[in-house]
Image (cartoon, grey):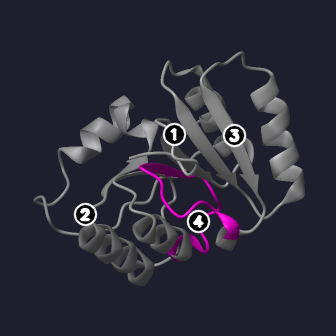
Amino acid sequence: MRGAGGTDMMPVAVLGCGNVGSRHLQGLLKLDLPMEIHVYDPSPASLARAEARASDVPYTRKEIRWYSRADSLARRFHAAIIASISAGRVPLVELAARSGCRYLLMEKLVCQSMGEYREIERLCDEAGITAWVNFNCRYFRGYERVTGELPAAGTICRLAAFGGNHGLAC
């Protein structure tokens, strides 16, 4: 997929650029790939923080475009990272689906209800989006033990985990 300017840069979106999203942006900037990165957040403070963090990373072959309104985002992107708060994610997944997005990474928590989850699942299925949830705690020994005790694949269950002092990246 060509970038918005007709370049050979891969168009990627970061939707939500607060603490976690701005760290994803830094990670993208470190990749040795030509990318056109579209960064969206409705908060001017979050955009400013992300811009400051981006300036901390030396990078080449990247173009960054900043947006405070979702309706002004580029019309096409290949991959997206959704790092916004979980409330209101369905419209961002709709945006990704309309944009031709093929790969989507969503930060935990994905959404606020099973209805929203099913809508996100439907949107991804219909658009052919391969989606992942970034939840690195799944590799903790306790979570791995619980995984072996969950119902068969394909069923939805309720799992609650309580704890504290998780830090920025859990």
Give the Cα separation between the discs numbered 2 and 3.
26 Å
Task: In this rendered view, identify the residue nearer to me: 145 or 155.
Answer: 155
Q: Which residues are magenta?
A: 72-90
Amino acid carrying mark 2 in the image:
Gly
Give the Cα separation between the discs numbered 1 and 3.
13 Å
The first of marks 2 and 3 along the sequence is: 3
Task: In this rendered view, identify the residue nearer to me: 90 or 114.
Answer: 90
Please give the name of the residue rendered at 40% of the width and 57% of the height, measured from the top-left corner: 101
**Mark 4 and mark 1 in contact (Cβ < 8 Å)?**
no
Q: Residues within 10 Å of mark 1 (few under 14, many from 20)?
A: few
Q: Nearer the viewer, mark 1 or mark 3?
A: 1
Residue 7, given in percent of the width and then of the height, sits at 51, 39
The first of marks 1 and 2 along the sequence is: 1
**Can you say whether 98 is above or below 21 in the image?**
below
Q: Which residue is mark 1?
A: 7
The first of marks 1 and 4 along the sequence is: 1
Q: Residues within 10 Å of mark 2 (few under 14, many from 20)?
A: some
Residue 25, given in percent of the width and then of the height, sits at 64, 36
Amino acid carrying mark 4 in the image:
Ser
Which element carries disc 1, helix, strand or loop? Answer: loop
**Can you say whether 36 is above or below 66 in the image?**
above
- Indicate yes or no whether the magenta region holds residue 12: no
Which element carries disc 3, helix, strand or loop? Answer: strand
Which element carries disc 4, helix, strand or loop? Answer: loop
Q: Which residue is mark 3?
A: 64
Q: Nearer the viewer, mark 1 or mark 4?
A: 1
Q: Which residue is mark 2?
A: 128
Q: Which residue is mark 4?
A: 86
For the C terminus, which image quadrant?
Answer: top right
